Amino acid sequence: MPDHSSQPVVSLRDIHKHFGALEVLKGISLEAQKGEVIAILGSSGSGKSTMLRCINMLELPTAGEVAINGEAIRLKVTRNGPAIADQKQIDRIRTRVAMVFQSFNLWSHMTIEQNLIEAPIHVQGRHRSDCIAEAKALLDKVGIADKIDAYPAHLSGGQQQRAAIARALAMHPDVMLFDEPTSALDPERVGEVLKVIRALAEEGRTMLVVTHEMAFAREVASRVIFLHQGRIEEDGPAKETFANPKSERFRQFIATAHNH
Amino acid sequence: MDFAFIGQTFLQLLGGIPLTLKLAAVAFLIASVLAVLIAIIRTRKIPVLDQIAGFYVFVLRGTPLLVQIFLIYYGLGQFRPTLQSLGLWQFLRDPYWCSILALALNSSAYASEILRGGLRSVPVREIETARAYGMSGLRLYRRIILPIAIRRALPGYGNELILMVKATSLTSTITLMEVTGIAAKLISESYRPVEVFIAAGVIYLAINFILTRVIALLDWWLTPHLRRPRIVAAKLEPAHA
């Protein structure tokens, strides 16, 4: 259940993002409370991935403020646009915000185990033996315990994505960001990854999931956000919003998705 | 062909191997450190340093190594007072250190280009992921970028090591008695260049044969992710209940 009593885990305030003359985000404000599972929907080009990448500063917003657990991320303005003001702060905050990417992005020269323990050991400074024990448990949880010594290239897409989710979990993050986690998978592999994400949602983890999987959004998310041309067009509890969209565009979006 | 003489010469030339290997190893180590720095400067396009590094590489690749050795050995004497005041003269009047310097600088220019290719081939997504997991600066290079780049650059880098071993032969022109230096001396004593150079050639060939094997082994050992997975035992998946 979302917890509204404390400060939001993620807070975006009037985020704008320009790529040259193109304005991709036109003022996004959003608060994610602890325990919320937010599905972020929108057609391609609506800015949903860019929005997600602004949360951990893989894209630097041109204007606006991002705060994680109430701590605002410091940026500075340079001639070439926004820049990181305090790399240490961002590195620290990024360990609280684990991202799962569309194309998995496991480090190719490391085994699955090494992928899982890399940042916990070398960024968070945790004990190697603890990290290894936890890596085993996490891989067991996502159902690929037998792949612990394999290299990413030797796994199927679904297995790689599950390993990437385990890598994110190994950080003990406060919030998880999923950037179209099933879009690069073969259709028959989508289910196994969604199953893992669904289990995480049921654990009460705070998650923001950019997705095209409408059924998943409807059933798993507690809240749904629909982006259109860089603005939040619809924002509400998942079930009600799907049943009764306030915005005509979201209604059309759902209808089109159903016909596919 | 006098095989007995070749055998005799071969034994005498063996005495030059330690110096040949020492020159190659020390110069290669210094070159590697310089090459990493130059490659990072040029990849990150750090202003001013990038231009200086680019010019450095241009000059050192564009002029013959022999000319560089002569310039350093004969030319630096002109700056003797300055070098003395810097405490460098005791090194730079010594043909051994002049050779090390020339070999290291020359090789660093080539090696930096090889490494730069390796750095450029590191998948952007893997770097971005490392950033998203809290890595930056030196740690990002040490843990992710360089391990991937070095693996990709290794075959080319191995070539550079072999070129280095062969390049040490040029230091015989400034009096060093490594394998080729001893060979030159034996020729002036015996007037039998063919036999002497055959023996010397065999030695270089043997050294480089071992080095190519070592590099291939290192490459194999560092890139298990590029090999097919080893099948330990045929394991049957249990049927779904």
Image (cartoon, helix red, strand yellow):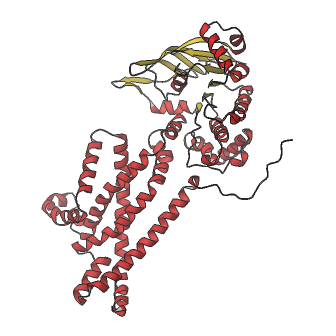
How far across and how far down the image is residue A137, in percent? 72, 42
Q: Quadrant of residue A121?
A: top right
The quarter of the image holding the N terminus of chain B is: bottom left
In the image, is B71 to the left or to the right of A5? Answer: left
In the image, is B101 to the left or to the right of A159? Answer: left
Residue for point 65% across, 25% down: A207
Q: Nearer the viewer, residue A73 or B193?
A: B193
In the image, is A89 to the left or to the right of A186? Answer: left
Residue farthest to the left, as pictured:
B78
Compared with A130, A233 (above or below) is above
* Image label count: 0
Q: Is residue B15 visible?
A: no
In the image, is B52 to the left or to the right of A29? Answer: left
Residue for point 72% across, 38% down: A142
Residue farthest to the right, as pictured:
B241
Residue for point 60% across, 41% down: A120
How far across and how far down the image is residue A166, in percent? 66, 38
Compared with A144, A218 (above or below) is above
How far across and how far down the image is residue A172, in percent? 64, 34
How far across and how far down the image is residue A171, in percent? 62, 36
Compared with B33, B40 (above or below) is above
Q: Is residue B179 visible?
A: yes
Q: Nearer the viewer, residue A73 or A103?
A: A103
The quarter of the image holding the C terminus of chain B is: top right
Residue for point 49% across, 68% down: B213
Compared with B231, A83 (above or below) is above
